[in-house]
Image (cartoon, rainbow, N blue to C red):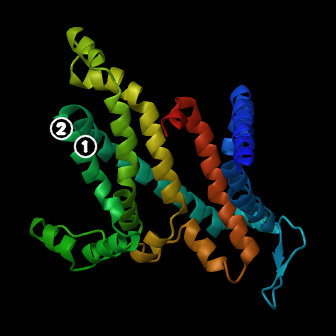
Amino acid sequence: MARRGGAVRAGRARAAGTLHRRPRLRLALLLGAPLTWLVVAYLGSLAVLFASGFWTTDPFTSDVVKSWSAENFRALFTTEVYRRVALRSVGVALAVTVLCAVIAFPVAFYTARVARPRWRPLLVVAVLTPLWASYLVKAYAWRVMLAEGGPLDWALGPFGLSGPGYGLTATVIVLTYLWLPYMILPLHAGLERIPDSFLDASADLGARTWRTFRTVLLPLALPSLAAGSVFTFSLSLGDYIAVQIVGGKSQLIGNLVYSNITLDLPMAAALGAVPVVIIVLYLLAVRRTGALGSL
């Protein structure tokens, strides 16, 4: 037994020495399992999604026919309703991203640079608190608030105003509320890293608040802002639940994918490839800002 235990310890020592001398082997063993899972489960599923968009559907049985055709992708560019829904989806995602940026910047600036240091962790927790609630609970809560005669109409009634009701405006409001923390957190981290000396130097040189914000603060926070926009844009572009709850008759890409998934799977796959392509193009665009390093 002692001899066997000594052999085991010697084998472990040789293995440890080999890994110590070969850092690339150590890195490969460390990342091998997660990278394999990423390639097989994530990239593999995207490849299958894209490939199935070239299949067709039997018009009588609705069965998938694995015969290659580009008809589904051609329909995306030639059919007016698909083009309109795609542009509407991108517009909603951009509107949500802009609103999140406008709301998140002053909040993040306060939590990162104005609030007392002992209060900052509590404020970050407060920002994260809405994420602990269920997506459906929050969406249906907004449905109640936006309903005709609901709390929002009651609050705006004395001013002669009314709520937006159900539609695209309601969808943008709900998505902005849902994804706002994903914009605040990167901005908080980015603004917290800016040295105080930069702002002091700007003030010493005679720059007023707006000029300091425009020439010092905003350029330094731009990578964090772009990093947050990756989350808000991608999450809004692929969302289909919020528009079903508060969107009224509005349709986005996610709704078309959901409605086609049982009747025309290849067309649903082709529609599902659209947001993937748009998000990849968006990532390539924001990559130049250094945003991916801030994620």
Taking the view exactly as shown, the residue that stands out farthest to the left is 158
Residue under the point 25% across and 25% down: 210
The amino acid sitting under disc 1 is: Pro
Taking the view exactly as shown, the residue that stands out farthest to the bottom is 60
Task: Check disc 2 and report the residue beneath it.
Answer: 118
Marks 1/2 in contact by CB < 8 Å: the verdict is: yes
When the figure is inspected, residue 119 is found, relative to residue 55, above or below; the finding is above
Residue under the point 57% across and 68% down: 254
Observer-nearest residue: 146 or 107? 107
Task: Check disc 1 and report the residue beneath it.
Answer: 121
Q: CA distance from mark 1 to mark 2?
A: 7 Å
Residue under the point 60% across and 73% down: 256
The reply, left or right, for residue 57 in relation to residue 267 is right
**Hey, which quadrant is residue 73 in on the image?**
bottom right
Taking the view exactly as shown, the residue that stands out farthest to the top is 205
Residue under the point 40% across and 61% down: 175
Badge 1: few (under 14), some or many (20 or more) residues near its Cα, within 10 Å? Answer: few
When the figure is inspected, residue 155 is found, relative to residue 3, above or below; the finding is below
Pinpoint residue 12: horizontal percent, then vertical percent. 70, 40
Question: Does dot 1 land on a helix, a strand or a loop?
Answer: helix
The amino acid sitting under disc 2 is: Arg
